Image (tube, grey):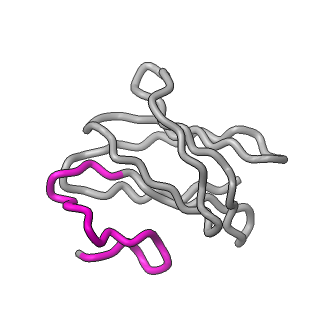
Amino acid sequence: MCSATEGGLSLDGVDVAKEAVIQGVVTRGDAPVGGAYVRLLDGSGEFTAEVPTSATGHFRFFAAPGQWTLRTLAPKADPVDHAVVAATGTVAEVAISL
């Protein structure tokens, strides 16, 4: 597969067979939420990484295989936690609604 779901992030140049990818989109209603922050927390809840969402609400992490929590922080919204499993050779697609 050369790209993510339609309208999602391109996987061109990413060797998915060798990576554990977590990516997705943050929305409020039907609108993407740009400028939100998505944190990657490990299995014990410890902060590992953080990325801002793009103007289209998209984000991506390259993570070690295992259980993770995505914590989304955005203006005028309560934090939202979403459990996800990363595995080498797969792309975990996550849709987060605020």
- Furthest residue in direction front, as rendered: 13
Quadrant of the rendering where the N terminus is positioned: bottom left
User: Where is 14 relative to 64, above or below?
Assistant: below
User: Residue shown at 28%/37% (left/top)?
Assistant: 64
Q: How many marks?
A: 0
Does the stretch in magenta take in 17?
Answer: yes
Most frequent secondary structure within the magenta stretch? loop
Q: Measuring 43% from the left and 19% from the top, which residue is drawn there?
A: 44
The x and y percentages for residue 86 are 31, 44
41 with respect to 72 (left or right) = left
Residue 30 falls inside the magenta stretch: no
| Front one among 82 and 47 | 47
Q: Residue furthest left?
A: 17
- Please tell me which residue is depicted at 69% across the width and 61% down the height of the picture: 33
Left/right of residue 75 with respect to residue 16 in the rendered view: right
Q: Specify the segment rendered in magenta.
A: 2-21
The relative height of residue 16 versus residue 82 in the rendered view (above or below) is below
Q: Where is residue 48, by image quadrant? A: top left
- At x 71%, y 72%, the residue is 30
Q: Position of residue 6 (x, y in %)?
A: 44, 80
What percent of the width, then of the height, locates residue 62? 34, 46
> Is 4 left or right of 7, judged from the image as shown?
left
Task: Report the residue that reaches farthest toward the bottom.
Answer: 6
- Seen from the viewer's position, the closer of residues 85 and 51 is 51
Counting from the top left corner in percent of width and height, residue 11 is at 32, 68
Q: Viewer-proximal residue, 11 or 77?
A: 11
- Residue 72 found in image quarter: top right
